[in-house]
Image: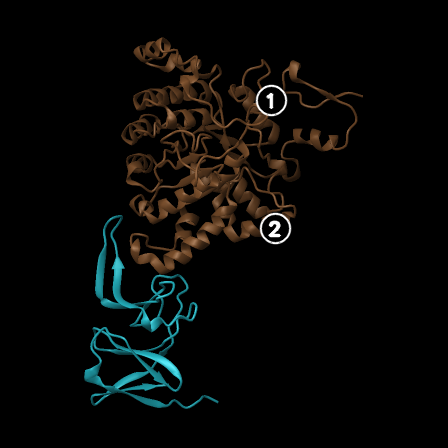
């Protein structure tokens, strides 16, 4: 039988600037919450699916691309979370690992902004 | 009762053997591909030599260059190339492969065809001159290396290719000058039996822009790049170095030389050179192949985490290798239990392997005794199909 989700209040919406991960403990689990450039919110379990690292303490950067050797571009509109251990990259808009042929996924929780208050369901 | 073992060696070298265990096995090497007669075989690594060494090249040198080499007695002294690692038995060349008139092994296209192709049911072979590779990458004068490369190539095209269409050729280029190398590729690369370009490596990683003029010419002509151990790694300044210094013995250098292959594969992928030249294929000859699986696991795993450092690498490194690389099978490492080799090959994939004998060298692998544990479909791919795609057979 599916367990009923609980709703946890994180704090005021104003206290969560774009692109900065905020770590909270909910029901005994560490969860990172972040507001993307698009305005969307994400709540991520602080555990890398690769080796269990505290991934939410990693860099939140953009997506690097290239047209060929020596050419680099950085698309900051895509938030990519980089694991501080082995560097695996996850697109925060989807939770999926970037570029890998069989991408792993972050554990994501529903999150919403209700009249200026942020809530995570888990 | 005395039995002549090998009919092909000169009289003075022939020996007789009285009853001995394993004699039937020895004489069975004369059968043509006996255990799977329908298997098509292409040999991706055969080493011809000029019949009379460098003297044979003089007819292919411009007059003034011939006079120059004569005056400095370069031809007679082997261009003064100092000693390299010597095989402890005196030579890497098989004594039994000498020509019937006592000439050097692999110095006669007619005898090579009989002794290698006809005898073992091999459909064709890729020739690359091992000696030219060593000399061109180490020759002290770049200008001389350019002239000698052309002389080597003209010699083999003229003296070897005309008589037997089964013979393909990988001309050696004077790598010390990549622009001249590209010119040499364009000069002879359209010959119908030129099937690859042999780049004797210098001590520059293969992904470096240094090689790009050669790669551009190869891609333009649809010829794969062929690299081969030269035997002079770590000996001369400018030739590929082995990690942590020069080996102390032939056997030590032999065991360590796959390092060059490992570094080269990693460099080609991570430099983005494969994206720069999207149609170019690479054949690594005699660097071994079991290390490739380990390298690919490491490359894929590291790319997964550090891809943003080399964003021009647009897919997992192993994908490039399966699409664009081949590794020759000789010298085939041989675990005591053949099934272990089968497992290791399954980890790598037989799509990246192509059969080679290394004729006429001592550590050859002949078809009847090589990779027999593979499934028929894998043997078909390794012994012919993979090479056929790379060399457009």
Residue B141 in the image: above or below residue B309:
above
Residue that protrudes farthest toward the right in the picture = B1
Could you tell which of marks 2 and 1 lies nearer the N-terminus? 1
Tell me which corner region of the image, top left, top right, bottom left or bottom right, holds residue A66: bottom left
Of B136 and B179, the residue lying toward us: B136
Which disc, if any, is residue B95? 1
Q: Which residue is mark 2?
A: B340
Where residue B285 appears, as percent x and y from the top left, is 47, 36
Same chain for marks 2 and 1?
A: yes
Chain where mark 2 sits: B
B245 versus A118 height, above or below: above
Q: Chain A: what color?
A: cyan
> Residue B124, labelled with which disc?
none
**Residue at position x 63%, y 20% from top?**
B8
The quadrant of the rendering that contains the N terminus of chain B is top right
Q: Residue B290 appears at what percent x and percent y?
A: 52, 46
Q: Which sits in the foreground, B268 or B31? A: B268
Q: Residue furthest left?
A: A14
Q: Where does residue A108 sit, x and y in percent of width and height? A: 35, 78
Q: Colour of chain B?
A: brown
Is residue B354 something one can see in this rendering? yes
Q: Residue at x 23, y 54 (%)?
A: A72
Dot 1: chain letter: B
Q: Residues within 10 Å of mark 2 (few under 14, many from 20)?
A: few
Q: Is residue A33 left or right of residue B320?
A: left
């Amino acid at each position: 039988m599916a367990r009923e989700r609980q709703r946890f209040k994180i704090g005021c919406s104003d206290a969560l600037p774009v692109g900065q991960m905020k770590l909270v403990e909910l029901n005994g689990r560490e969860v990172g919450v972040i507001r993307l450039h698009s305005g969307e919110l994400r709540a991520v379990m602080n555990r890398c699916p690769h080796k269990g690292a505290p991934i939410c303490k990693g860099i939140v950067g953009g997506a690097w691309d290239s047209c060929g050797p020596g050419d680099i571009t950085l698309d900051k509109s895509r938030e990519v979370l980089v694991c501080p251990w082995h560097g695996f990259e996850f697109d925060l808009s989807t939770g999926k690992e970037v570029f890998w042929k069989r991408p792993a996924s972050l554990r994501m929780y529903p999150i919403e902004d209700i009249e200026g208050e942020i809530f995570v369901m888990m | 009762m005395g039995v002549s073992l090998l009919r092909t060696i000169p009289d003075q070298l022939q020996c007789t053997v009285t009853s001995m265990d394993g004699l039937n096995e020895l004489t069975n090497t004369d059968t043509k591909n006996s255990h799977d007669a329908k298997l098509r075989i292409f040999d991706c690594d055969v080493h011809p030599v000029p019949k009379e060494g460098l003297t044979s090249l003089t007819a292919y040198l411009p007059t003034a260059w011939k006079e120059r080499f004569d005056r400095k007695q370069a031809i007679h002294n082997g261009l003064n190339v100092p000693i390299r690692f010597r095989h402890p038995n005196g030579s890497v060349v098989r004594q039994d492969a000498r020509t019937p008139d006592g000439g050097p092994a692999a110095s006669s296209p007619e005898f090579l065809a009989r002794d290698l192709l006809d005898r073992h049911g091999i459909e064709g072979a890729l020739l690359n001159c091992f000696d030219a590779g060593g000399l061109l990458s180490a020759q002290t004068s770049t200008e001389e290396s350019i002239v000698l490369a052309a002389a080597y190539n003209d010699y083999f095209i003229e003296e070897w290719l005309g008589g037997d269409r089964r013979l393909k050729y990988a001309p050696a280029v004077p790598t010390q000058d990549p622009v001249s190398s590209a010119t040499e590729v364009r000069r002879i690369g359209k010959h119908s039996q030129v099937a690859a370009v042999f780049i004797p490596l210098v001590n520059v990683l293969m992904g470096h822009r240094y090689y790009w003029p050669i790669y551009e010419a190869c891609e333009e002509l649809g010829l794969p790049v062929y690299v081969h151990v030269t035997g002079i790694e770590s000996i001369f300044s400018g030739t590929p170095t082995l990690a942590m210094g020069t080996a102390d013995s032939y056997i030590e250098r032999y065991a360590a030389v796959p390092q060059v292959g490992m570094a080269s594969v990693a460099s080609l992928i991570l430099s983005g050179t494969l994206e720069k030249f999207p149609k170019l294929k690479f054949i690594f000859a005699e660097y071994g192949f079991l290390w490739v699986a380990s390298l690919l696991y490491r490359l894929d795993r590291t790319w997964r985490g550090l891809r943003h450092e080399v964003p021009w690498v647009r897919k997992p490194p192993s994908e490039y290798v399966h699409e664009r690389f081949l590794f020759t099978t000789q010298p085939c490492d041989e675990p005591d239990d053949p099934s272990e080799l089968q497992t290791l090959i399954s980890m790598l994939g037989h799509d990246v392997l192509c059969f080679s004998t290394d004729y006429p060298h001592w550590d050859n692998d002949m078809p009847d005794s090589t990779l027999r544990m593979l499934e028929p479909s894998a043997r078909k791919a390794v012994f012919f199909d993979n090479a056929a795609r790379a060399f457009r057979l």
